[in-house]
Each structure stands twice: as structure tokens, then as C-alpha cells.
Image: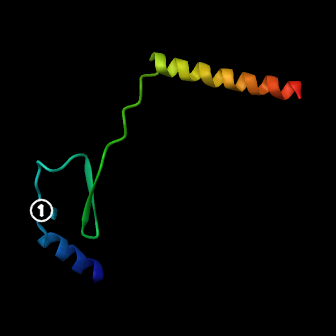
Amino acid sequence: MKEERIDARLGQRPISQEDRTLKTGRELKQGEAVVAIRPPPPKPAADSPRVRAAALLEEDRARVKREAALRE
């Protein structure tokens, strides 16, 4: 019952009415506030230089850790 009253109040507020120009991404209504959420950033392609560099860096870090563990 309380949620119905909140929903009714939200429907009367100007910010909750449809205005296509103000919407960016997905919007969630929490209480009386409207929160806009950006979509996640696009993932780089698997064959991009950044992905290859990140994989090489991971391998190097793992190798250094293994070598450090063997020395101890």
C-alpha cells in the first residue's frame, strides 16, 4: 500500500513525466529522485594492441612472482 502511494506521488511530479530529451541511458526512480545510469564502457576487441599488452603484462607479473618464490 505504501508503494502505491509513492508511485502515485511520483506520477504527479514533473520530473517523472516522459521527456525524451532529458533521458540519457537507463533511468531508475528511487524515492523521489531520478538517477541516470550510463551504459558500461565498450570492451576493446580481443585482437587490439591494448588487450595483447595487458595479457603480456599479466604473464610477466606471474613469471616474476614465480621466480621470486623460487629464489626464497
Q: Amino acid at mark 1?
A: Gln
59 with respect to 64 (left or right): left
Which residue shows up at 50% across the image and 22% down it? Answer: 51
Q: Quadrant of residue 71?
A: top right
Let me know if residue 47 appears in the view: no
Quadrant occupied by the N terminus: bottom left
Q: Quadrant of residue 27?
A: bottom left
Q: Residue at x 41, y 30 (%)?
A: 43
| Tag 1 residue | 17
Q: Is residue 11 placed above or below 62 in the rendered structure?
A: below
Residue nearer the viewer, 5 or 50: 50
The quarter in which the C terminus is drawn is top right
Closest to the observer, 35 or 5: 35
Q: Which colour style is shown?
A: rainbow
**x then y, percent, for residue 37:** 31, 50
In the figure, is residue 23 to the left or right of 3? Answer: left
Q: Is residue 71 visible?
A: yes
Q: Position of residue 3 (x, y in %)?
A: 28, 77
59 up-or-down from 11: above or below = above
Secondary structure found at label 1: loop
Q: Where in the figure is residue 55, as x and y percent of width and height?
A: 58, 22
Residue positioned 47% across, 16% down in the render = 49
Residue lying at the far bottom of the rendered structure: 1
Q: Specify the quadrant of the image occupied by residue 10.
A: bottom left
